[in-house]
Image (cartoon, coloured by chain):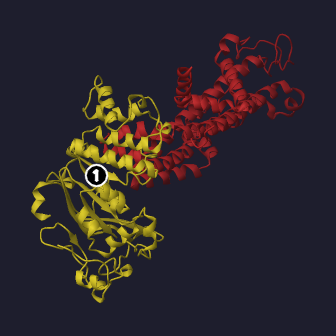
Chain colours: A yellow, B red
Amino acid sequence: MSTLQNEALIRVEDLKVYYLVKGGIINHTVGHTKAVDGVSFSIMEGEILGLVGESGCGKSTIGRQLVGLERPTAGKIFFEGRDLSLLKKGQMQKIRTQLQMVFQDPYSSLNPRRHIYEILSQPMLYHGISTRETVEKDMVRILDMVGLSRNVLGRYPHEFSGGQRQRIGIARALSLNPRFIVCDEPVSALDVSIQAQILNLLRSLQKELNLTLLFVGHGLGAVNYVSDRIAVMYLGKIVETGPAREIFRHPAHPYTRALIEAVPVPDPQEKEKERKLLEGEIGDSNHPPAGCRFHPRCPFAQAGCAQKEPALVEICEGSGHYTACPVTGADKEEQGIGEIHC
Amino acid sequence: MKRNEEKKRRDIVSESYLQTIGRRFMHHHLAVVSLVVVALLAGAALLAPVIAPYNPDDIVGPFSGAPSGEFWLGTDQIGRDVLSRLLYAMRISLLVGVMATLISTVIGVVLGLIAGYFGGVADMAIMRFTDMVMSFPYILLVLVAAAVFKPGLWNIILILGFVDWPGIARLVRGNVLNLRETNFVKGNIVAGMPLRHILFSEILPNTVAPILVYATSVLALSMLDEAALSFLGLGVQPPTASLGNMLNGAQSLTVLTKQPWLWIPAGLLIVILVMAINFIGDALRDALDPGSRR
């Protein structure tokens, strides 16, 4: 990963996002919620990075950070090598259009009082991406890309289904010619039958426009389907990252393993097989467990796990597959949970 | 045939927001009647110079004359035509109500937007100030203002305008707090839209409905307040007629018992106007509620 740093479109270095917890009579700060606690990764141009983890692990926070909706507590975010936090307001405004976002809930992501024409045209006109004369043509072209016809323009958001609204949300993100799009759980609010359509749409648009995507999701199924590379998060930390196929086939971290176990299998025979599902709740991000944050729920936890916080270590030289679990492959094999290949 | 159906379907789907509101409003028959009543009264008030039979300030008949063919609603203690005065009084009362509501709505919306969107210190300062104004007895304010300035039409408008805004400010702030967190506002931030666009084109239109509903009750209230203050002699000063100071005469027991034409019409008009405006507000609340999909 580090060898490719100079080519990365997005690079995140030791990102920390703490939210203040206020309380008491005088409403003073009584603690921090460590939503993201020291996360580093990079995304290459034209790559789709999938970010997975259960609710509350900080994955959406990272998404909001990358599009500049929130400021980091510590750490740096580089876009094309420029540190976003050092940019002046005017410079940020120019970069803004290149970093777009598709939201989770398509029902609240469009202003109910404006018709699609206004929703799509205003940002394009404001940024000078289109002119009054060409804007309609441009909008029709983008709508065509997301599989909608021109007669949606005169309608209001409430006249559309969830899938159609998500298409409009994607069209809005695309309209500013972005280079990077954060897809924050773009399908989790949609019907299952629609999810695949939207996922396919995102994939094909990514190829067509050579976009770079961060795909945030909580299930490995959908994320694996679209992503080139996957990063698995647990309680504000990345616990495993690597090529999507590698992660899915040879998960090295017990948490990743549990996520894969949780993907529903559409084979009735498989039901017989006992699935090891994770027990317990995600820990408290105000007071994360000492050592490895996953150890209270980990079936392989050893004595050392509660003391030392494990670092991300590459499993095999050059594989790009990193894990933050010091329990060696041999130990895991002993307990009968698959093997680690190089 | 098929094309016809298609057209019909399109007509249903593309019913505009205003049409939907209009249709829902029509379900409230009382509100529709109220709207007609208010429109008629407001029209009569506006056209007072044309339709009033006499000059409201001129002495044209006997003192305290009972209603007759010449003076439909009689004459007052000094011989002015009650009907003419009533028409002009309605003008003044509506003017006070509308202007006071406008002023308080503008103040409330601006402060509410700032407090809700920026939060932090601005929110804190504005909301504490709002609490202060809310807890201040406005009669006292009016008494002081009347002592310092001369009581009169514009003073009463300004005073009522500066007293009624806290409710609107709170309402707007609450709405803005919600809207600020919605994805469409965030989407606009991500799209790099300027603050004025986000505040006035994205957030404000989504709070217009509750503001409108609240404003109708402010309108009714400030008309009542004007009547009360003028009745006490602190509001609109004679000879200018307002519905409140026309009731002034009813402070005397003789008038109250023997000359009902001097106070019943003015009192009745206040009741009718305030009730009608409140009915309209109720219907608006239902019609504008995005939750109901009738």
Decide if residue A282 is on the left or right side of residue B1. Answer: left
Image vertical order of residue B52 relative to residue B159, above or below: above
Decide if residue A335 is on the left or right side of residue B168. Answer: left
Q: Nearer the viewer, residue B215 or A111?
A: A111
Q: Residue furthest bottom?
A: A303
Question: How many neighbours does mark 1 have within 10 angstroms: few (below 14), some (14-19), or many (20 or more)?
Answer: many
Q: Nearer the viewer, residue A220 or B36?
A: A220
Can see residue B218? yes
Question: Given the image, what chain letter belongs to the residue carrying mark 1?
Answer: A
Q: Residue furthest front?
A: A269
Residue appearing at x 29%, y 40% in the figure: A174
Residue underneath mark 1: A68
Q: Amino acid at mark 1?
A: Gly
Rendered location of residue A339, percent (x, y): 25, 77
Decide if residue A246 is on the left or right side of residue A162. Answer: left
Helix, strand or loop for disc 1: loop
Q: Residue furthest right?
A: B258
Q: Quadrant of the C terminus of chain A?
A: bottom left
Image quadrant assignment for residue B233? top right
Residue appearing at x 64%, y 27% in the figure: B94
